[in-house]
Image (tube, coloured by chain):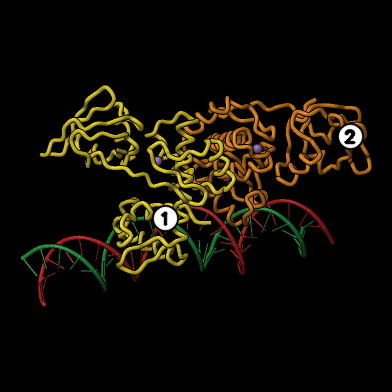
Chain colours: A yellow, B orange, C red, D green
Amino acid sequence: MFSLSEENYLKAIFHLQTHPKAGVSTNALAEEMQTKASSVTDMVKKLSDKHLVIYKKYQGVYLSDSGRETALQIIRKHRLWEVFLVEKLDFSWDEVHEVAEELEHIKSEKLISELDKFLDYPKRDPHGDPIPDAHGDFQVANKTLLADLTKEEKGTLVGVKDTSPEFLKYLDKNNIALGKTIEVLDKEEFDGSMLIQIEDQSLRVSTMVTANIFIKI
Amino acid sequence: MFSLSEENYLKAIFHLQTHPKAGVSTNALAEEMQTKASSVTDMVKKLSDKHLVIYKKYQGVYLSDSGRETALQIIRKHRLWEVFLVEKLDFSWDEVHEVAEELEHIKSEKLISELDKFLDYPKRDPHGDPIPDAHGDFQVANKTLLADLTKEEKGTLVGVKDTSPEFLKYLDKNNIALGKTIEVLDKEEFDGSMLIQIEDQSLRVSTMVTANIFIKI
DNA sequence: TAAAATATTTAGATACCTCTAATTTTAAAA
DNA sequence: TTTTAAAATTAGAGGTATCTAAATATTTTA
Ligand SMILES: [Mn+2]
Ligand SMILES: [Mn+2]
Ligand SMILES: [Mn+2]
Ligand SMILES: [Mn+2]
Protein backbone atom coordinates (compact mmCIF):
# COMPACT_ATOMS: atom_id res chain seq x y z
CA MET A 1 0.00 0.00 0.00
CA PHE A 2 2.36 2.75 1.19
CA SER A 3 6.12 2.83 1.41
CA LEU A 4 8.04 2.56 4.65
CA SER A 5 8.96 6.25 4.45
CA GLU A 6 5.42 7.35 3.74
CA GLU A 7 4.16 5.38 6.74
CA ASN A 8 6.80 6.84 9.04
CA TYR A 9 5.99 10.36 7.88
CA LEU A 10 2.26 9.89 8.48
CA LYS A 11 2.95 8.62 11.98
CA ALA A 12 5.26 11.54 12.69
CA ILE A 13 2.68 14.06 11.49
CA PHE A 14 0.06 12.41 13.68
CA HIS A 15 2.29 12.70 16.74
CA LEU A 16 3.20 16.32 16.05
CA GLN A 17 -0.37 17.37 15.27
CA THR A 18 -1.36 18.61 18.72
CA HIS A 19 -3.29 21.76 17.86
CA PRO A 20 -5.87 21.08 15.14
CA LYS A 21 -5.69 24.71 14.06
CA ALA A 22 -1.98 24.93 13.24
CA GLY A 23 -0.38 22.71 10.62
CA VAL A 24 2.77 20.74 11.36
CA SER A 25 5.80 22.75 10.28
CA THR A 26 8.44 21.50 7.89
CA ASN A 27 11.22 21.96 10.42
CA ALA A 28 9.35 20.14 13.18
CA LEU A 29 8.83 17.21 10.83
CA ALA A 30 12.47 17.28 9.76
CA GLU A 31 13.55 17.18 13.40
CA GLU A 32 11.16 14.30 14.20
CA MET A 33 12.20 12.33 11.11
CA GLN A 34 15.91 13.02 11.59
CA THR A 35 16.17 14.41 8.09
CA LYS A 36 16.48 17.72 6.24
CA ALA A 37 13.73 20.24 5.61
CA SER A 38 14.12 19.89 1.85
CA SER A 39 13.48 16.16 2.07
CA VAL A 40 10.36 16.86 4.10
CA THR A 41 9.03 19.25 1.48
CA ASP A 42 9.49 16.60 -1.20
CA MET A 43 7.76 13.91 0.81
CA VAL A 44 4.91 16.17 1.90
CA LYS A 45 4.20 16.94 -1.74
CA LYS A 46 4.06 13.25 -2.51
CA LEU A 47 1.71 12.58 0.42
CA SER A 48 -0.43 15.46 -0.76
CA ASP A 49 -0.63 13.97 -4.27
CA LYS A 50 -1.91 10.77 -2.65
CA HIS A 51 -4.46 12.77 -0.60
CA LEU A 52 -2.99 11.58 2.67
CA VAL A 53 -2.28 15.13 3.86
CA ILE A 54 -3.53 18.63 3.21
CA TYR A 55 -0.68 20.90 2.28
CA LYS A 56 -0.33 24.47 1.17
CA LYS A 57 3.13 25.86 0.56
CA TYR A 58 4.58 27.62 3.61
CA GLN A 59 1.41 26.84 5.60
CA GLY A 60 2.39 23.54 7.22
CA VAL A 61 0.77 20.16 6.74
CA TYR A 62 -2.37 18.46 8.14
CA LEU A 63 -3.45 14.82 8.01
CA SER A 64 -6.47 14.13 5.83
CA ASP A 65 -9.06 11.65 7.09
CA SER A 66 -7.45 8.82 5.18
CA GLY A 67 -4.00 9.93 6.32
CA ARG A 68 -5.12 9.89 9.93
CA GLU A 69 -6.68 6.47 9.44
CA THR A 70 -3.46 5.11 7.99
CA ALA A 71 -1.37 6.64 10.77
CA LEU A 72 -3.60 5.05 13.40
CA GLN A 73 -3.23 1.62 11.84
CA ILE A 74 0.57 1.93 11.97
CA ILE A 75 0.38 3.11 15.57
CA ARG A 76 -1.91 0.17 16.39
CA LYS A 77 0.63 -2.23 14.96
CA HIS A 78 3.56 -0.49 16.66
CA ARG A 79 1.95 -0.71 20.09
CA LEU A 80 0.70 -4.28 19.71
CA TRP A 81 4.21 -5.40 18.77
CA GLU A 82 5.57 -3.55 21.80
CA VAL A 83 3.18 -5.48 24.02
CA PHE A 84 4.25 -8.72 22.36
CA LEU A 85 7.93 -7.99 22.89
CA VAL A 86 7.49 -7.19 26.57
CA GLU A 87 4.86 -9.80 27.49
CA LYS A 88 6.07 -12.73 25.45
CA LEU A 89 9.75 -12.17 24.62
CA ASP A 90 11.00 -10.65 27.88
CA PHE A 91 12.03 -7.33 26.37
CA SER A 92 12.13 -4.42 28.80
CA TRP A 93 10.13 -1.28 28.04
CA ASP A 94 13.24 0.62 26.98
CA GLU A 95 14.20 -1.97 24.32
CA VAL A 96 10.96 -2.30 22.38
CA HIS A 97 10.62 0.96 20.50
CA GLU A 98 13.40 0.44 17.95
CA VAL A 99 12.25 -3.05 16.96
CA ALA A 100 8.58 -2.06 16.86
CA GLU A 101 9.61 0.74 14.52
CA GLU A 102 10.40 -1.98 11.97
CA LEU A 103 7.69 -4.51 12.84
CA GLU A 104 4.94 -1.90 12.42
CA HIS A 105 5.49 -1.96 8.65
CA ILE A 106 4.75 -5.66 8.09
CA LYS A 107 1.77 -5.88 5.75
CA SER A 108 -0.77 -8.47 6.88
CA GLU A 109 -4.26 -7.90 8.20
CA LYS A 110 -4.43 -11.42 9.56
CA LEU A 111 -1.08 -11.08 11.33
CA ILE A 112 -2.20 -8.09 13.33
CA SER A 113 -5.69 -9.35 14.17
CA GLU A 114 -4.28 -12.70 15.31
CA LEU A 115 -1.56 -10.96 17.30
CA ASP A 116 -4.23 -8.82 18.96
CA LYS A 117 -6.14 -11.98 19.90
CA PHE A 118 -2.96 -13.77 21.05
CA LEU A 119 -2.20 -10.87 23.38
CA ASP A 120 -5.82 -10.91 24.60
CA TYR A 121 -6.76 -7.54 23.13
CA PRO A 122 -4.54 -5.25 25.21
CA LYS A 123 -5.76 -1.70 25.68
CA ARG A 124 -2.38 -0.05 26.41
CA ASP A 125 1.23 -0.52 25.36
CA PRO A 126 4.18 -0.88 27.78
CA HIS A 127 4.49 2.91 28.01
CA GLY A 128 0.84 3.41 28.93
CA ASP A 129 -0.20 4.61 25.47
CA PRO A 130 -3.63 3.51 24.19
CA ILE A 131 -3.81 0.89 21.41
CA PRO A 132 -6.29 1.79 18.67
CA ASP A 133 -8.68 -1.01 17.71
CA ALA A 134 -9.12 -2.32 14.16
CA HIS A 135 -11.31 0.71 13.36
CA GLY A 136 -8.74 3.15 14.71
CA ASP A 137 -10.78 3.96 17.81
CA PHE A 138 -9.13 4.38 21.19
CA GLN A 139 -9.88 5.96 24.56
CA VAL A 140 -8.07 9.17 25.41
CA ALA A 141 -7.29 8.80 29.11
CA ASN A 142 -7.66 11.86 31.30
CA LYS A 143 -4.16 12.25 32.57
CA THR A 144 -2.07 15.08 33.96
CA LEU A 145 1.62 15.77 33.86
CA LEU A 146 3.27 15.17 37.23
CA ALA A 147 4.75 18.64 36.76
CA ASP A 148 1.26 20.15 36.94
CA LEU A 149 0.42 18.62 40.32
CA THR A 150 0.73 20.71 43.46
CA LYS A 151 1.89 19.81 46.95
CA GLU A 152 0.00 16.96 48.61
CA GLU A 153 -1.77 15.92 45.41
CA LYS A 154 -1.42 12.23 44.53
CA GLY A 155 -2.33 9.82 41.76
CA THR A 156 -1.29 6.78 39.74
CA LEU A 157 1.49 6.71 37.16
CA VAL A 158 -0.33 5.85 33.92
CA GLY A 159 2.12 6.83 31.21
CA VAL A 160 5.36 8.41 30.08
CA LYS A 161 5.79 11.17 27.53
CA ASP A 162 9.47 10.61 26.77
CA THR A 163 9.96 6.98 25.74
CA SER A 164 13.71 7.16 25.13
CA PRO A 165 15.78 4.29 26.56
CA GLU A 166 17.73 6.83 28.66
CA PHE A 167 14.64 8.13 30.46
CA LEU A 168 13.09 4.68 30.86
CA LYS A 169 16.28 3.26 32.33
CA TYR A 170 16.39 6.17 34.78
CA LEU A 171 12.86 5.29 35.88
CA ASP A 172 13.75 1.60 36.23
CA LYS A 173 16.79 2.47 38.34
CA ASN A 174 14.58 4.43 40.73
CA ASN A 175 11.79 1.85 40.80
CA ILE A 176 9.38 4.18 39.09
CA ALA A 177 6.94 2.11 37.02
CA LEU A 178 3.43 2.16 35.52
CA GLY A 179 0.68 1.62 38.04
CA LYS A 180 2.56 2.93 41.05
CA THR A 181 1.10 5.61 43.32
CA ILE A 182 2.90 8.95 43.45
CA GLU A 183 2.33 11.75 45.94
CA VAL A 184 3.87 15.22 45.75
CA LEU A 185 5.48 15.78 49.16
CA ASP A 186 7.01 19.09 48.19
CA LYS A 187 7.44 21.30 45.16
CA GLU A 188 10.36 23.73 44.84
CA GLU A 189 9.02 26.91 43.24
CA PHE A 190 12.49 28.04 42.11
CA ASP A 191 13.24 25.22 39.64
CA GLY A 192 10.03 23.19 39.72
CA SER A 193 11.74 20.12 41.14
CA MET A 194 9.67 17.88 43.39
CA LEU A 195 10.05 15.64 46.35
CA ILE A 196 7.77 12.71 45.62
CA GLN A 197 6.64 9.68 47.56
CA ILE A 198 6.46 6.58 45.39
CA GLU A 199 5.40 3.44 47.22
CA ASP A 200 7.74 3.23 50.22
CA GLN A 201 10.48 5.54 48.97
CA SER A 202 10.76 9.31 48.69
CA LEU A 203 12.81 10.88 45.94
CA ARG A 204 13.69 14.32 44.56
CA VAL A 205 13.15 14.68 40.80
CA SER A 206 13.78 17.49 38.33
CA THR A 207 11.32 18.97 35.81
CA MET A 208 13.04 16.84 33.15
CA VAL A 209 11.38 13.97 34.99
CA THR A 210 8.09 15.51 36.15
CA ALA A 211 7.34 16.91 32.69
CA ASN A 212 7.52 13.39 31.21
CA ILE A 213 5.35 11.40 33.60
CA PHE A 214 1.58 11.15 33.24
CA ILE A 215 -0.55 10.82 36.36
CA LYS A 216 -4.19 9.86 36.73
CA ILE A 217 -5.62 11.54 39.78
CA MET B 1 23.61 -4.30 7.44
CA PHE B 2 22.26 -5.41 4.06
CA SER B 3 19.28 -4.18 2.10
CA LEU B 4 16.05 -6.09 1.72
CA SER B 5 16.89 -6.84 -1.92
CA GLU B 6 20.38 -8.02 -1.13
CA GLU B 7 19.06 -10.36 1.55
CA ASN B 8 16.43 -11.80 -0.77
CA TYR B 9 19.00 -12.38 -3.49
CA LEU B 10 21.37 -14.17 -1.11
CA LYS B 11 18.56 -16.44 0.03
CA ALA B 12 17.56 -17.19 -3.56
CA ILE B 13 21.13 -18.04 -4.53
CA PHE B 14 21.37 -20.34 -1.52
CA HIS B 15 18.21 -22.19 -2.54
CA LEU B 16 19.26 -22.53 -6.17
CA GLN B 17 22.80 -23.61 -5.31
CA THR B 18 22.29 -27.39 -5.46
CA HIS B 19 25.46 -28.51 -7.23
CA PRO B 20 28.54 -26.93 -5.64
CA LYS B 21 30.38 -27.24 -8.94
CA ALA B 22 28.04 -25.21 -11.16
CA GLY B 23 27.28 -21.57 -10.42
CA VAL B 24 23.73 -20.27 -10.27
CA SER B 25 22.73 -18.90 -13.67
CA THR B 26 21.47 -15.39 -14.23
CA ASN B 27 18.23 -16.63 -15.77
CA ALA B 28 17.53 -19.03 -12.91
CA LEU B 29 17.99 -16.22 -10.44
CA ALA B 30 15.79 -13.90 -12.49
CA GLU B 31 13.05 -16.54 -12.52
CA GLU B 32 13.35 -17.14 -8.76
CA MET B 33 13.37 -13.41 -7.98
CA GLN B 34 10.56 -12.61 -10.40
CA THR B 35 12.69 -10.01 -12.13
CA LYS B 36 14.69 -9.49 -15.32
CA ALA B 37 18.11 -10.92 -16.12
CA SER B 38 19.61 -7.45 -16.46
CA SER B 39 18.52 -6.56 -12.94
CA VAL B 40 20.13 -9.76 -11.70
CA THR B 41 23.45 -8.92 -13.36
CA ASP B 42 23.45 -5.51 -11.67
CA MET B 43 22.68 -6.94 -8.25
CA VAL B 44 25.17 -9.78 -8.58
CA LYS B 45 27.90 -7.23 -9.31
CA LYS B 46 26.95 -5.33 -6.20
CA LEU B 47 26.98 -8.49 -4.07
CA SER B 48 30.34 -9.35 -5.56
CA ASP B 49 31.71 -5.92 -4.62
CA LYS B 50 30.62 -6.66 -1.06
CA HIS B 51 32.30 -10.09 -1.20
CA LEU B 52 29.03 -11.89 -0.55
CA VAL B 53 29.26 -13.88 -3.79
CA ILE B 54 31.92 -15.06 -6.19
CA TYR B 55 31.10 -13.95 -9.69
CA LYS B 56 32.82 -14.15 -13.04
CA LYS B 57 31.03 -12.79 -16.06
CA TYR B 58 29.03 -15.44 -17.95
CA GLN B 59 30.11 -18.10 -15.41
CA GLY B 60 27.25 -17.92 -12.92
CA VAL B 61 27.40 -16.92 -9.28
CA TYR B 62 28.42 -18.73 -6.07
CA LEU B 63 27.90 -17.74 -2.44
CA SER B 64 31.07 -16.82 -0.57
CA ASP B 65 31.45 -18.02 3.01
CA SER B 66 30.09 -14.76 4.36
CA GLY B 67 27.29 -14.80 1.79
CA ARG B 68 26.30 -18.29 2.84
CA GLU B 69 26.43 -17.26 6.49
CA THR B 70 24.16 -14.30 5.83
CA ALA B 71 21.72 -16.39 3.79
CA LEU B 72 21.48 -18.94 6.59
CA GLN B 73 20.66 -16.26 9.13
CA ILE B 74 17.80 -15.00 6.94
CA ILE B 75 16.57 -18.56 6.48
CA ARG B 76 16.77 -19.10 10.25
CA LYS B 77 14.62 -16.04 10.80
CA HIS B 78 12.16 -16.98 8.05
CA ARG B 79 11.58 -20.46 9.48
CA LEU B 80 11.35 -19.35 13.10
CA TRP B 81 8.71 -16.80 12.16
CA GLU B 82 6.83 -19.50 10.24
CA VAL B 83 6.78 -21.64 13.38
CA PHE B 84 5.55 -18.66 15.39
CA LEU B 85 2.73 -17.96 12.97
CA VAL B 86 1.51 -21.55 12.95
CA GLU B 87 2.04 -22.43 16.62
CA LYS B 88 1.01 -19.18 18.26
CA LEU B 89 -1.16 -17.24 15.81
CA ASP B 90 -3.20 -20.07 14.27
CA PHE B 91 -1.94 -19.55 10.74
CA SER B 92 -2.12 -22.61 8.48
CA TRP B 93 1.02 -23.84 6.73
CA ASP B 94 -0.10 -22.40 3.41
CA GLU B 95 -0.47 -18.85 4.81
CA VAL B 96 2.88 -18.34 6.50
CA HIS B 97 5.37 -18.01 3.68
CA GLU B 98 4.33 -14.59 2.40
CA VAL B 99 4.35 -12.97 5.84
CA ALA B 100 7.62 -14.66 6.84
CA GLU B 101 9.10 -13.25 3.65
CA GLU B 102 8.74 -9.81 5.26
CA LEU B 103 9.40 -10.70 8.89
CA GLU B 104 12.73 -12.34 8.03
CA HIS B 105 14.22 -8.88 7.35
CA ILE B 106 13.64 -7.39 10.81
CA LYS B 107 17.03 -6.47 12.23
CA SER B 108 17.40 -7.51 15.87
CA GLU B 109 19.63 -10.21 17.32
CA LYS B 110 17.70 -10.18 20.57
CA LEU B 111 14.36 -10.50 18.79
CA ILE B 112 15.35 -13.70 17.06
CA SER B 113 17.11 -15.32 20.00
CA GLU B 114 14.15 -14.55 22.27
CA LEU B 115 11.72 -15.81 19.64
CA ASP B 116 13.75 -19.02 19.39
CA LYS B 117 13.51 -19.44 23.16
CA PHE B 118 9.80 -18.56 23.22
CA LEU B 119 9.15 -21.28 20.63
CA ASP B 120 11.30 -23.71 22.66
CA TYR B 121 14.08 -24.01 20.09
CA PRO B 122 12.18 -25.72 17.26
CA LYS B 123 14.27 -27.85 14.90
CA ARG B 124 11.94 -27.76 11.87
CA ASP B 125 9.51 -25.29 10.31
CA PRO B 126 5.88 -26.08 9.41
CA HIS B 127 6.99 -27.49 6.04
CA GLY B 128 9.52 -29.87 7.60
CA ASP B 129 12.55 -27.75 6.69
CA PRO B 130 15.39 -27.59 9.22
CA ILE B 131 15.94 -24.38 11.21
CA PRO B 132 19.60 -23.31 11.38
CA ASP B 133 20.85 -22.44 14.86
CA ALA B 134 22.49 -19.12 15.77
CA HIS B 135 25.75 -20.35 14.22
CA GLY B 136 24.03 -21.36 10.98
CA ASP B 137 24.33 -25.09 11.71
CA PHE B 138 21.49 -27.47 10.92
CA GLN B 139 20.99 -31.19 10.35
CA VAL B 140 20.40 -32.35 6.80
CA ALA B 141 17.79 -35.06 7.16
CA ASN B 142 18.13 -38.16 5.01
CA LYS B 143 14.94 -38.05 3.06
CA THR B 144 13.70 -39.43 -0.24
CA LEU B 145 11.17 -38.16 -2.72
CA LEU B 146 7.98 -40.15 -2.64
CA ALA B 147 8.39 -40.44 -6.40
CA ASP B 148 11.57 -42.47 -5.88
CA LEU B 149 9.90 -45.13 -3.76
CA THR B 150 8.86 -48.42 -5.28
CA LYS B 151 5.84 -50.64 -4.67
CA GLU B 152 5.35 -51.75 -1.06
CA GLU B 153 7.95 -49.34 0.32
CA LYS B 154 6.72 -47.16 3.18
CA GLY B 155 7.89 -44.28 5.32
CA THR B 156 6.94 -41.09 7.15
CA LEU B 157 6.10 -37.80 5.48
CA VAL B 158 8.81 -35.44 6.73
CA GLY B 159 8.71 -32.53 4.32
CA VAL B 160 7.39 -30.86 1.18
CA LYS B 161 9.45 -29.51 -1.71
CA ASP B 162 6.78 -27.24 -3.20
CA THR B 163 5.54 -24.87 -0.49
CA SER B 164 3.04 -22.98 -2.63
CA PRO B 165 -0.38 -22.37 -1.07
CA GLU B 166 -1.97 -24.30 -3.96
CA PHE B 167 -0.03 -27.48 -3.26
CA LEU B 168 -0.38 -27.22 0.51
CA LYS B 169 -4.13 -26.72 0.26
CA TYR B 170 -4.33 -29.80 -1.97
CA LEU B 171 -2.53 -31.79 0.72
CA ASP B 172 -4.82 -30.44 3.46
CA LYS B 173 -7.89 -31.36 1.43
CA ASN B 174 -6.65 -34.94 1.18
CA ASN B 175 -5.54 -35.18 4.81
CA ILE B 176 -1.92 -35.49 3.85
CA ALA B 177 0.21 -33.94 6.59
CA LEU B 178 3.67 -34.02 8.15
CA GLY B 179 4.31 -37.05 10.34
CA LYS B 180 1.83 -39.36 8.64
CA THR B 181 2.83 -42.79 7.37
CA ILE B 182 2.67 -43.39 3.63
CA GLU B 183 2.91 -46.74 1.85
CA VAL B 184 3.16 -47.21 -1.91
CA LEU B 185 0.40 -49.69 -2.79
CA ASP B 186 0.98 -49.46 -6.51
CA LYS B 187 3.05 -47.47 -9.00
CA GLU B 188 1.90 -46.95 -12.59
CA GLU B 189 4.96 -47.24 -14.83
CA PHE B 190 3.30 -45.35 -17.68
CA ASP B 191 2.91 -41.94 -15.98
CA GLY B 192 4.57 -42.52 -12.61
CA SER B 193 1.35 -41.99 -10.68
CA MET B 194 0.94 -43.89 -7.45
CA LEU B 195 -1.74 -45.48 -5.34
CA ILE B 196 -0.74 -44.68 -1.77
CA GLN B 197 -2.03 -45.72 1.62
CA ILE B 198 -1.97 -42.83 4.08
CA GLU B 199 -3.31 -43.66 7.52
CA ASP B 200 -6.73 -45.23 6.88
CA GLN B 201 -7.29 -43.94 3.35
CA SER B 202 -5.91 -44.94 -0.02
CA LEU B 203 -5.45 -42.37 -2.76
CA ARG B 204 -4.10 -42.08 -6.28
CA VAL B 205 -1.64 -39.23 -6.80
CA SER B 206 0.23 -37.87 -9.82
CA THR B 207 3.97 -37.20 -10.15
CA MET B 208 3.18 -33.50 -9.54
CA VAL B 209 2.41 -34.70 -6.02
CA THR B 210 4.94 -37.50 -5.51
CA ALA B 211 7.83 -35.35 -6.72
CA ASN B 212 7.08 -32.78 -4.02
CA ILE B 213 6.76 -34.94 -0.94
CA PHE B 214 9.73 -36.00 1.15
CA ILE B 215 9.66 -39.37 2.90
CA LYS B 216 11.89 -40.74 5.62
CA ILE B 217 12.10 -44.47 5.30
C1' DT C 1 7.72 49.76 7.98
C1' DA C 2 12.20 48.57 6.43
C1' DA C 3 15.99 45.47 7.52
C1' DA C 4 17.49 41.25 9.39
C1' DA C 5 16.74 36.65 10.74
C1' DT C 6 14.40 32.46 10.17
C1' DA C 7 11.69 29.10 7.72
C1' DT C 8 10.61 26.91 3.60
C1' DT C 9 11.00 25.67 -1.07
C1' DT C 10 13.50 24.81 -5.42
C1' DA C 11 17.48 23.29 -8.23
C1' DG C 12 20.63 20.04 -9.06
C1' DA C 13 22.96 15.88 -7.65
C1' DT C 14 23.65 10.99 -5.83
C1' DA C 15 22.55 6.12 -4.39
C1' DC C 16 19.49 2.24 -4.96
C1' DC C 17 16.77 -0.83 -7.64
C1' DT C 18 14.40 -1.71 -11.51
C1' DC C 19 13.18 -1.70 -16.56
C1' DT C 20 13.65 -2.07 -22.10
C1' DA C 21 16.48 -2.33 -25.97
C1' DA C 22 20.84 -3.19 -27.96
C1' DT C 23 25.15 -5.67 -27.84
C1' DT C 24 28.26 -9.33 -26.74
C1' DT C 25 29.44 -13.96 -25.34
C1' DT C 26 28.62 -18.78 -25.07
C1' DA C 27 26.32 -23.02 -26.39
C1' DA C 28 23.83 -25.73 -29.79
C1' DA C 29 22.68 -27.07 -34.44
C1' DA C 30 23.48 -27.71 -39.14
C1' DT D 1 33.34 -25.52 -38.47
C1' DT D 2 30.40 -22.13 -39.70
C1' DT D 3 25.78 -20.62 -38.61
C1' DT D 4 22.09 -20.02 -35.53
C1' DA D 5 19.97 -19.78 -31.14
C1' DA D 6 20.15 -18.86 -26.34
C1' DA D 7 22.09 -16.64 -22.36
C1' DA D 8 24.18 -12.87 -20.32
C1' DT D 9 25.80 -8.19 -20.16
C1' DT D 10 25.84 -3.24 -21.16
C1' DA D 11 23.70 1.23 -22.23
C1' DG D 12 20.46 4.34 -21.14
C1' DA D 13 16.49 5.57 -18.57
C1' DG D 14 12.85 6.15 -14.65
C1' DG D 15 11.05 6.17 -9.81
C1' DT D 16 12.08 6.68 -4.86
C1' DA D 17 14.34 8.87 -1.19
C1' DT D 18 17.84 11.48 0.24
C1' DC D 19 21.38 15.40 0.31
C1' DT D 20 23.73 20.42 -0.27
C1' DA D 21 23.44 24.91 -1.88
C1' DA D 22 20.78 28.60 -3.68
C1' DA D 23 16.51 31.13 -3.98
C1' DT D 24 12.25 32.74 -2.05
C1' DA D 25 8.72 33.55 1.42
C1' DT D 26 7.46 34.61 6.10
C1' DT D 27 8.28 36.30 10.63
C1' DT D 28 10.75 38.97 13.88
C1' DT D 29 13.33 42.90 15.27
C1' DA D 30 14.73 47.43 15.24
MN1 LIG E 1 8.74 2.70 11.47
MN1 LIG F 1 5.10 2.75 23.08
MN1 LIG G 1 12.09 -11.67 2.05
MN1 LIG H 1 8.99 -23.00 5.30
- On residue B179, the disc is none
Q: Where does the image place residue A177, in percent across and percent down from the top left?
A: 33, 30
Residue contact between numbered discs 1 and 2, judged by CB atoms under 8 Å: no
- Res. B55 in view: no
Could you say which is closer to the camera, residue B85 or residue B11? B85
Task: Please tell me whether mark 2 sits on a helix, a strand or a loop.
Answer: strand
Q: Are both tags, 1 and 2, on one chain?
A: no
Q: Is residue B126 above or below residue D19?
A: above
- On residue B202, the disc is 2
Quadrant of res A204: top left
Q: Is residue A203 above or below residue A15?
A: above
- Res. B152 in view: yes
What residue is shown with label 1?
A: A10
Local packing at callout 2 (Cα closer than 10 Å; few below 14, some 14-19, many 20+) is some
Could you say which is closer to the camera, residue B45 or residue A173? A173
Q: Residue at x 86, y 40 (%)?
A: B205
Q: Where does the image place residue A188, in percent across and percent down from the top left?
A: 13, 36
Q: Residue at x 27, y 27 (%)?
A: A198
Q: Pick the quarter of the image with the C terminus of chain A.
A: top left
